[in-house]
Image (tube, rainbow, N blue to C red):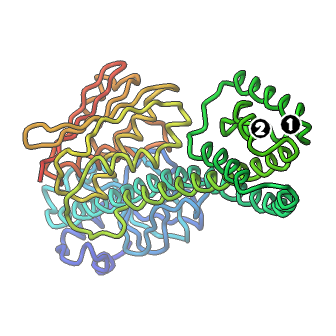
């Protein structure tokens, strides 16, 4: 049996009187574990306070061992049951990572400890509060990392399409430009006057400056047939290839007649080819421009969301900017479930004084939870208005609602209605803490088909 001096080497027991340590020794029992021996499986009862005299004990997430490591206790570590702890079962697996020698105190002795060993109880309760603080910090960090992971995945998904469009259009444009010299050679052999060139340029830029028409499949097919027939009637080669770009920019047979009247029949083939060549170039450049703008918007949203290029203190915040940035980053989840979104948060709402990064975390958690609760094709509404000295923001969904028996618990730490591995139960607890940090309030009203979270933040 270890001595009092052995227990004095535990940092937690440095100030505990010797007679109280002797009380512990008189009631404890020794136990040894071999390397990688499973001490307790997840879900099994926890009935002992465990003092690690020698060796190394690991708490992990399951049979995968090191990859799922949660905490490690070496010599002079304290784990297991503690005074006033409500622990009943092991949440995770406990394994002897190295051969370990421990001292075990059964839970029945913990009931009498506070009355006879005040300093010992105080030391162990301090261990419990430290454990809770460390565990909460760990889970909060995991929650933030999980949130960051979701947003990163969404950002990668959203960036993939415009980036692919830029690459694809750039490659096509490069191949297209290789054909430009042949088109130029054809033009150079035509007998065109300045008036002919000006007329063709006028037809080209008139269509480029106008928004392309929106056509149904039938309308587009009929127009392509008409233009193909017109080109065939005037012996223009490759009529099928030329008709598509002309239709896309709204050219009709009347436009082609107008060009014909000014360019002469003998020149019409070369002129039409030159027109289409420029239309294709313009289309590829527009595709690259639109995709680049989309990338710029996404980068701007993530910069705004993460509060980059700004200070770390309180500042004037326009809530509408953070909400829209958050929706941009969660757009992939909204699209995946075909969720329609209605945003009515005026830009002219009064500013609030706060931490933009923290407030964006509020919108992320509330909107993300709403998306998870909504069925395919659901509806999400976000509104903002002035409510006395507050800006009142509401996040409303038409999902199944929150059951009455859990409505009062949703803001409690670690409470979650999601399946194991899908939620930590800290999302709404974090939201409540952030809102409180901003001297605001958050409330929820829910019934089937209508769940409404209301967040009040004081106007600066």
**Is residue 260 shown left or right of residue 364?**
right
Q: Is residue 133 visible?
A: yes
**Is residue 128 shown left or right of residue 169?**
left
**Is residue 197 shown left or right of residue 436?**
right
Check disc 1 and report the residue beneath it: 240
Whether residue 123 is situated above or below residue 48 in the rendered picture? below
Q: Is residue 86 visible?
A: no
How crowded pointer 2 is (Cα within 10 Å; few <14, some 14-19, many 20+) is rated as some
Quadrant, the N terminus: bottom left
Q: Position of residue 201 (x, y in %)?
A: 67, 51
Whether residue 47 is situated above or below residue 336 in the rendered picture? below
Q: Quadrant of residue 346?
A: top left
For the residue pair 219 and 28, the one nearer the viewer reads as 219
For the residue pair 194 and 5, the one nearer the viewer reads as 194
Give the total number of marks visible in the rendering.
2
Whether residue 166 is situated above or below residue 398 in the rendered picture? below
Check disc 2 and report the residue beneath it: 244
Kind of element beneath mark 1: helix
Q: Position of residue 460 (x, y in %)?
A: 11, 54
For the residue pair 357 and 403, the one nearer the viewer reads as 357
- Check whether the beta carbons of the residues at disc 2 and disc 1 lie within 8 A of each other: yes
The residue that appears at 67% across and 52% down in the rendered structure is: 198
Q: Position of residue 29 (x, y in %)?
A: 39, 62
Query: Real-space Cα distance between discs 2 and 1?
Result: 7 Å
Q: Position of residue 209 (x, y in %)?
A: 56, 46
């Amino acid at each position: 049996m270890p001595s009092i001096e052995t227990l004095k080497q535990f940092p937690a027991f440095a100030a505990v009187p010797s007679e109280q340590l002797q009380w512990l020794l008189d009631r404890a029992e020794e136990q040894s574990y071999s390397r990688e021996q499973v001490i307790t499986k997840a879900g099994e009862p926890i009935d002992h306070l465990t003092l690690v005299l020698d060796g190394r004990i690991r708490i992990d997430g399951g049979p995968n061992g090191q990859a799922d490591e949660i905490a490690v206790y070496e010599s002079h570590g304290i784990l297991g049951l503690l005074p006033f702890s409500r622990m009943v079962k092991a949440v995770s697996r406990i394994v002897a990572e190295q051969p370990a020698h421990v001292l075990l105190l059964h839970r029945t002795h913990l009931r009498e400890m506070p009355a006879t060993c005040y300093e010992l109880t105080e030391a162990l309760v301090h261990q419990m509060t430290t454990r809770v603080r460390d565990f909460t910090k760990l889970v909060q960090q995991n929650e933030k990392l999980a949130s960051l992971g979701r947003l990163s995945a969404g950002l990668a998904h959203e960036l993939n399409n415009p980036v692919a469009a830029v690459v694809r259009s750039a490659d096509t444009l490069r191949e297209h430009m290789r054909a430009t010299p042949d088109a130029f050679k054809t033009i150079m052999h035509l007998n065109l006057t300045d008036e002919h060139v000006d007329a063709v340029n006028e037809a080209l830029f008139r269509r480029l400056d106008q928004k392309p028409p929106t056509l149904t499949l039938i309308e587009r097919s009929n127009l392509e047939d008409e233009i193909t027939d017109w080109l065939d009637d005037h012996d223009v080669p490759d009529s099928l290839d030329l008709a598509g770009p002309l239709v896309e920019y709204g050219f009709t047979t009347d436009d082609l007649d107008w060009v014909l009247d000014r360019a002469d029949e003998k020149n019409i083939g070369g002129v039409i080819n030159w027109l289409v060549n420029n239309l294709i170039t313009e289309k590829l450049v527009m595709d690259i421009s639109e995709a680049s703008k989309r990338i710029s918007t996404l980068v701007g949203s993530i910069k705004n969301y993460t509060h980059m290029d700004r200070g770390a203190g309180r500042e004037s915040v326009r809530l509408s900017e953070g909400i829209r940035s958050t929706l941009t980053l969660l757009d992939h989840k909204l699209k995946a479930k075909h969720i329609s979104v209605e945003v009515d948060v005026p830009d002219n709402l009064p500013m609030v004084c706060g931490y933009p990064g923290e407030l964006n975390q509020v919108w992320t958690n509330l909107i993300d939870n709403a998306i998870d609760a909504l069925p395919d094709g659901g509806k999400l509404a976000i509104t903002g208005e002035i409510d006395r000295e507050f800006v009142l923001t509401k996040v409303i969904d038409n999902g199944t609602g929150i059951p009455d028996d859990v409505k009062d618990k949703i803001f409690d730490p670690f409470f979650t209605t999601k399946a194991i591995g899908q939620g930590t139960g800290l999302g709404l607890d974090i939201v409540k803490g952030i809102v409180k940090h901003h001297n605001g309030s958050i409330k929820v009203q829910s019934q089937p088909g209508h769940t409404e979270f209301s967040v009040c933040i004081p106007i600066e």
